[in-house]
Image (cartoon, coloured by chain):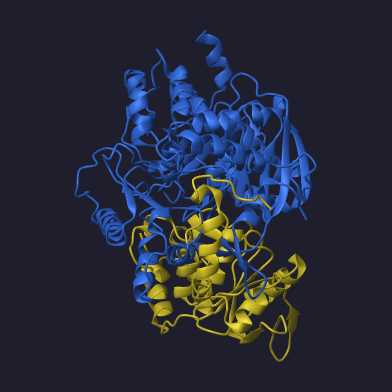
Chain colours: A blue, B yellow
Amino acid sequence: MSTGTLYDKVWDLHRVAELPGGSTQMFIGLHLIHEVTSPQAFAALKDMQLSVRCPERTIATVDHIVPTLSQKRPFLDPLAEEMLSTLESNCTKHQINFYGLNSGQQGIVHVIAPELGLTQPGMTVACGDSHTSTHGAFGAIAFGIGTSQVRDVLASQSLAMNKLKVRRIWVDGILNKGVYAKDLILYLIKSMGVKGGVGYAYEFAGPAINALNMEERMTICNMSIEGGARCGYVNPDSITYNYLKGRPYAPKGQAWDRAIEWWGKLSTDSMATFDDEIKFNASKISPTVTWGITPGQGIGIDEVIPILESIPVCERSIAEEAYTYMNLKPGQPIAGVPIDVCFIGSCTNGRLSDLRDAAMIAKNQKVAKGVKAFVVPGSEQVSKAAKNEGLDELFLSAGFEWREPGCSMCLAMNPDRLTGRQISASSSNRNFKGRQGSATGRTLLMSPAMVAAAAITGEVTDVRNLLDVSE
Amino acid sequence: MLVNKKYIYESMNSSFTFPKGQIANIKGRCMSLKGDDIDTDRIIPARYLKCVSFESLGSQVFADDRYQGNGSHPFDLDKNQGSTILIVNRNFGCGSSREHAPQALMRWGIRSIIGESFAEIFFGNCLALGIPCAIGSSELIKEIQDLIEFDNSEEFIFDLKKEQLFNAKTNWDIKFQSGVQEMFLTGQWDATSTLIKNSSKLNDLMAHLPYLQNFNPVKLN
């Protein structure tokens, strides 16, 4: 059993009661909701004649279903319109703060909560979305929940939970040029497997993690769930505090000084014990691309799609399924695979630094003929900041489309989707069968810079080659 | 997008009731769904999440896989209609936290899932809905799957207390995660009322949580 970790300390701070069956009632410090997983929770609340316990601790936005071309109301899709209007009326009825379209602060829930300073070290954060693990970047314990649990948080500001084990993932070295946080997390998932993290919270630590900025840390924690870990976190430090300072919900004045003192005590102790520890070296990582149908099926850009015999026996059936579905051959290099659609965005990689990294590649270049490439900022604030730097113009003149904020083609609940057997280079987080809106559509996950490189060349390309050209 | 309407409507004919209270056993026929890492996008593709109620999800379970299978998907096979116990392999329900996935399975008719392992959020969602998920070794799961793929006409009982799946001829040992068994047997899998009861303890905790008290000094245990 772990002791003295940030996870242990935050767990102890939020324990309300021990429940029958051995689970623990945990107070939830921040509850985020959106239009997809909340309507049935509010309906259940109504059926049970319950009210919202702490409306001030729930924050809402709309992200999954919003169109990214025209956001004019009512939406063309009546189902999407119904979902948004249901969320609006639920928030009004229960006095929940809602950051809607054109509020200046709407966006993907995991992008806006950090932007607003809502996510803070030491909190428990829950949201009906598996990528809630993103908020662990701040030293929060953050995890995705289902709709029944959304109902429970609304009704009681708490959840019945079981304590996780803690695995420290220590990353030495430093990421090479052209290798990004996305490559690191894809590499970690590939190494530990998509179920390696089941039952664990991941503590990301070590020199390579400490060197990451907050947006990069969010990318890492975001995809913990793709490695099976419901939550992942980084201990808070001066990079965390500098990011938070001055944001709307961040503490102010003397409270800020007290907050820093408290947050500092939450970090994992030097004498802490872990249930498991694994070490990696960031310097060894190349730009990484998935070739299959799980986020764990990744390879370096200079590698070939693994042959069956090189894959552990227990992974072979899913590998065979992937060869067929992806129509890629074992032994074939991943570099050079032709791309139809390029998507830059999502809660994994839709933040300002992601758009900057991609823009550096797209600058003074043209999207390859026949490729559809589009950029979807993660939030209205990201969009505004990017426009202030001229990134929208840069992308537009390179032949990318510039869209309005939302989840978009990460999961294709809006009109942005693949058609037929199209293959995408995507900065999102999941390459599951059918994930991007076509039952036969194919997804290659990679960093935003790698997506931009694929857009320019029309095929999977080592971004490091283009970086050399641009200098 | 939906095909095989014949099967869909047949399977939806069985009258739907929610699991309630103490759950000691699940009776019914078993069906096999083979494959590791079956994610919730496959169980219910995202476009079917455009709804404000779960009601119609039963007919949409595995919509894309079934469309591809053109009648050969386990959820479309005649012999599997009316099954209540689903036998799966490793890491079932990984990916998105959408409760729509177990809701779709439940509304199709599934009342319990037995597999090699489950993704955590999916497991929790099933617990919250009263769908027991239990574990068997890969050898055991393979044995059950092979048997019921050959012939699944016989009814089984999944006895939660004995942790066994059995009928007159056969009997397999199935395991629960610790604590989960008790929650089903006592009916405490439905956490909401218990959580609400502890309201005063919750107030105490909030009064001592630094970030709710403007970070004024509070003893850190």
Check the image and report above or below for B67 versus A363.
below
- Residue A396, image x, y percentages: 32, 22
Of B72 and B100, the residue lying toward us: B100
Q: Could you tell me residue A235's position as x and y percent?
A: 64, 38
| Number of numbered labels in the structure image | 0
Q: Position of B56 compared to B147: left or right?
A: left
Query: Taking the image as drawn, is residue B189 in sight?
Result: yes
Tell me the quarter of the picture where residue A57 sits: bottom left
Q: Nearer the viewer, residue B80 or A38?
A: A38
- Give the percent coordinates (x, y) of residue B113: 60, 72
From the image, which quarter does the N terminus of chain B lie in?
bottom left
> How far from the left and from the top, in percent, is residue B207?
52, 57
Q: B77 or A148, which is in the foreground?
A: A148
The image quadrant that residue A345 belongs to is: top left
Q: Is residue A18 left or right of residue B138?
A: left
Residue found at x 60% / y 75% = B132
- Left or right, A55 with respect to B194, comes to left
Is residue A209 positioned above or below A272 on the image? above
